[in-house]
Image (cartoon, rainbow, N blue to C red):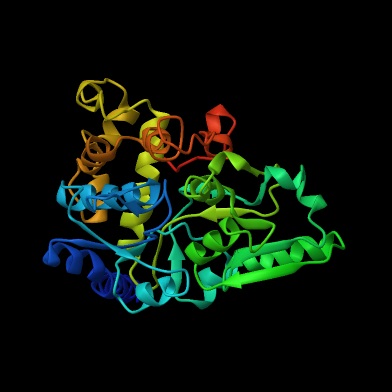
Amino acid sequence: MKRFASMLALGLVVCAQSASGQTLKAVTDRGMLNCGANGTLAGFGLPDAQGKWTGLDVDVCRAVAAAIFNDANKVKFVPLSAKDRFTALQSGEVDVLVRNTTWTSSRDTSLGLNFTGVDYYDGQGFMVRKALKVNSALELGDASVCVQQGTTTELNLADFFHAHNMKLKTVTFATANEAVKAYDAGRCDAYTTDASGLYAERLRLANSNDHIVLPEIISKEPLGPAVRHGDDQWFDVVKWTLFALINAEDLGITKGNVDEMMKSPSPEIRRVLGLEGNSGESLGLTNDWVVRIVKAVGNYGEMFENDVGANSPLKIERGLNKLWSKGGLQYAPPIR
């Protein structure tokens, strides 16, 4: 009986393994990762004049490609609207969605998605003209607010005004681009979206210095990559790619010193870099998968500073996105 139970358990494991791994195989056979991205948001997902995509979300996708192919350029970026992003992932048009998307319970449970972690801890805010002489979101009663429809942003906006007994006049638009253009044209008093998006969109305004981002953060917006339900191996690959970026920063492994770090006697560093253990093989990758990632895009901190932080036009402070050891929330399970 015990032998039968063991064989049954083994059979279940084999069946589970055969049911998973389809996405990684499809990506590998195709020779290209299809990544759902924003396409209009500076700092997160935006092609330049030459068509080269840049941004934090973009670099996460490049990290996944590097882990699989040892080539961060083997990515096809598919620009998706907020309305179309989930359908594109569900239908298989893209392999992973990395498009400044908030991890919520309804999205995680009812859309057939799995969120793989948080690549940016954000929160919703407001931008107004300095000429309005408003210093707080609590002074926006009776103000008209431009917002993109069909987003968590729209719901948070209504909740905030209701909670503070303020009268709300929403001006809704199908896309963020339309909402920003309307705000810039003076069709509303304020524009609301995630705070990171406010800093990005302000760069596109006719006179960016005439506008300020108000101090209030009215919601929790953990942004991160999402994959389809039903393929645990692919879920693990994307999840652990993000964790690898954070662990690399935590251990001081950078794009510039990764080769030197290969000589480290530290068991922890040696495991992360694939010199000990088989973390890569257990994911269906090579054991040097973290080395590939860091050589391609750097660690999480390097990505942050280059895409949205001090080395970028946005100049966003790391804030909650600092490592856990520096007072922030970024924390990754260990590779061991």
Is 85 situated left or right of 30 in this image? right
Is 12 situated left or right of 216 in this image? left
Residue in front for this viewpoint, 53 or 292: 53
* Residue 101, above or below 297: below
Q: Quick one: quadrant of the N terminus?
A: bottom left
Residue placed at 23% from the left, 73% from the top?
18
Residue 336 visible in this rendered orientation of the protein: no
Residue placed at 28% from the left, 39% from the top?
297
The x and y percentages for residue 306 are 37, 35
Quadrant assignment, res 230: bottom left
Residue in front for this viewpoint, 190 or 196: 190
The x and y percentages for residue 98 are 39, 58
Quadrant assignment, res 317: top right
Residue placed at 48% from the left, 45% from the top?
203
Residue 97 visible in this rendered orientation of the protein: yes
Residue placed at 52% from the left, 51% from the top?
197
Q: Quick one: quadrant of the C terminus?
A: top left
The x and y percentages for residue 75 are 22, 57
* Residue 63, above or below 182: above
Quadrant assignment, res 20: bottom left
The x and y percentages for residue 159 are 75, 65
* Residue 188, above or below 249: below
* Residue 213, above or below 36: above
Q: How many marks?
A: 0
